[in-house]
Amino acid sequence: MQSSLSLNHSTGDSLVLVDEFGKGTNTVDGLALLTASLNNWMRRGPQCPHLLMSTCFHSLIQLGLISDSPLLDLLTLETAIEGEELVFLYQVKNGICQSSCAANIATLMLSFIRKFILTFPFRKHKFFFKCFFLVLFV
């Protein structure tokens, strides 16, 4: 629904923010939807909305599914791996990420959850605890 609204009603003055495009879809469908959406927006030329998008579909570029355009800048966040630990350097750079680092992110989340479980006073905040895990794992 939200994608449909932004595709049908955004203008050159619109700001469209899309986080984790394709999350929850199978790879083929998600990649097809992303390609169609980006091509739709870029065909508009000056009426293309300002778009900030994150996605796990790195193959969009590697497979050449969208063409180069002066309207398109590909950016990624700089990271480093020290030993087995993922380090976020909080710097934006041109290009695309070379891997999703999903295993590293999962490890960080598990570490956070373990710390949370050991330090949070559950008896006082049972409702918050259930909501926290609902939000985290949905």
Image (cartoon, helix red, strand yellow):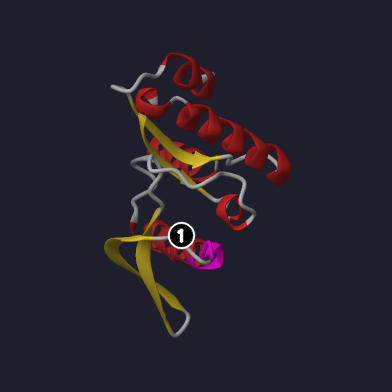
Corner quadrant of residue 15: top left
Residue 79 sits above or below residue 120 on the image: below
> Which image quarter holds the C terminus?
top right
Q: Quadrant of the N terminus?
A: top right
Q: Name the spot of residue 130 as percent of width and height, x first.
A: 47, 39
Image x and y of residue 50, in percent: 33, 32
74 or 132, nearer to the observer: 74
Report the residue at 38% width, 63% height from top.
115
Image point 38% across, 39% down: which residue? 71
Q: Identify which residue, 81 or 130, lies in the foreground.
A: 81
Q: Front-most of 132 and 96?
A: 96
Residue 20 appears at what percent x and percent y?
Answer: 49, 43
At label 1, the amino acid type is Ile
Horizontal relation, residue 30 to residue 112: left or right: right
Element assignment for label 1: loop
Is 50 magenta? The answer is no
Which residue is drawn at the image coordinates 28% and 22% (left, top)? 13
Q: Which residue is labeled 1 in the image?
A: 96
Query: Looking at the image, is 122 positioned above or below residue 82?
Result: above
* Image vertical order of residue 135 relative to residue 61, above or below: above
Q: Residue furthest bottom?
A: 83
- Report the number of numbered marks: 1
The boundaries of the magenta stretch are 99-104
Q: Nearer the viewer, residue 23 or 134?
A: 23
Residue occupying the point 53% across, 61% down: 100
Residue closest to the far top:
9
Give yes or no for residue 101 being in the magenta stretch.
yes
Sort mark 1 into few (<14), some (14-19) or many (20+) by Cα contacts within 10 Å: some
Quick check: 61 left or right of 114?
right
Left or right: residue 89 versus residue 29 is: left
Left or right: where 30 falls relative to 5: right
